[in-house]
Amino acid sequence: MLNDLNTSRSIIGKSFFNRYIRLIKHIDYALLFLVLGLCVLGLLVIYSSTHQENVANGTIQFVKKQVISILAGLLVCLLITIIDYHEITKLSIPGYVLSLIMLVYVIYYGKEIGGARRWIQLAGQEFQPAEFAKITLIIFLSDLLNKQKNKLPDLLYFSLPFLFTGILMFLSYKQPDLGTALVFFAITLLMVFIAGIPWKYISIGFVLTLSLFPILWSLLRDYQRSRLILFLNPEMDPLGAGYNVIQSKVAIGSGGLFGKGLFGGIQSQLKFLPSQHTDFVFAVIGEELGFVGALLLLSFFALLLWKGIKIAQEAPDLLGTFLATGITSFLFVQILINIGMSMGLMPATGLPLPFISYGGTFMISNFIGIGLLLNIHLRSIFN
């Protein structure tokens, strides 16, 4: 009998092992290596944009920390990949509630940097709860839209996502973090659109938003209103609120076709360009790698988004479609806003560039999103 028990355990163990080996063999390595390629490009640009600090301090601390963030993100990504996304979405409500708690906590007890409370310090490390809230919102909305499809009246079905998102937007606004609030809204809008919201509701929402604009405008802080106004003409305050965008546009424009080469950018190396390794990292790419380098980056991003759309289309069920749509929207909106901000086509909102900008929490949250895409791709194969 003992031998039979041992034999059964051996069979179960081998079956478990073989199952995950089979999953690993069928991972979308094209997507994974595409993301790692973006990370390598990001490391090169971060190394170049922080070169002066590296020389002064005799260290490459920014690059080291980013490498650690990439490795941690990759580990989490692979873990997310092998856990069935149906099991992950069972935690959608606890995840949403936890995000609410952390966002409330950070408003009152978070670490303040640059006049904003967006970070929680834990065990000597800082992390930004809003980055994880983006992912938990996508999981929560995917589960909600999937479970309530054809069960609720249309108006309620399409209104509930905006209600739950509105709470997160309000908490982000209080930090203040207008950029993240916009990302929350854009993700929800695109997911609800895929869910099949009628155009009449879109029209009603648009009219309602316009009617509430004076109230929303009055709720913005002075510097936020200033950013929105100067977006139209940053030269109105070239040494103040318009400085960042002006320097970014100068950097991109001076890069020419092939750029000035790594460590050769005047705007970045002489520190005329602010936040060159975070929010305005695209401007460094434009200046040092030129139009060709920027075009290569945009091609990588276009391929990444195409992979996300393809996974959403081929998902084995509606839940997978919602999840893949949410993650792809999450990446698209941040890419669009960051690059648009760097080129003066959008207001400066302080959003980093996925897989390129420096930042641990941001990097890990992006890798979680990629893990979910890989997860859905695998289940579409083994469905």
Image (cartoon, rainbow, N blue to C red):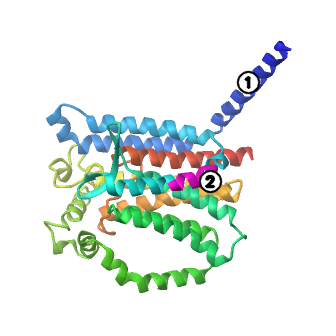
Which numbered tag is attached to residue 345? none
Query: Is residue 352 or residue 259 the one in the foreground?
Result: 352
Expressed as whole percent of the image width and height from the top left, the position of residue 215 reads 36, 81
Quarter occupied by the N terminus: top right
* Depth order, front residue of 119/238: 119
- Residue 249 place in picture, x, y as percent: 24, 63
The prevailing secondary structure element of the residues shown in magenta is helix
Q: Position of residue 34 (x, y in %)?
A: 49, 44
Start-end of magenta stretch: 89-97
Residue at 76% over, 26% down: 12
Q: In the rendered image, which residue does mark 2 sit on?
A: 311
Crowding near pointer 1: few (<14 within 10 Å), some, many (20+)?
Answer: few
Residue 155 visible in this rendered orientation of the protein: yes
Q: Is residue 91 magenta?
A: yes
The Cα–Cα distance between marks 1 and 2, rounded to whole angstroms, is 30 Å
Amino acid at the residue labelled 1: Lys
Q: Nearer the viewer, residue 115 or 13?
A: 115
Which residue position is annotated with label 1?
14
First reached walking from the N terminus: tag 1 or tag 2? 1
Under tag 1, what secondary structure?
helix
Does the image show residue 352?
no
Give percent across and percent down for residue 97.
52, 55
Identify whether 33 is placed above or below 209.
above
* Amino acid type at mark 2: Ile
On screen, residue 276 above or below 207: above
Which of the 4 quarters of the picture holds residue 223? bottom left
Residue 284 included in the magenta stretch of the image: no
On screen, residue 159 above or below 111: below
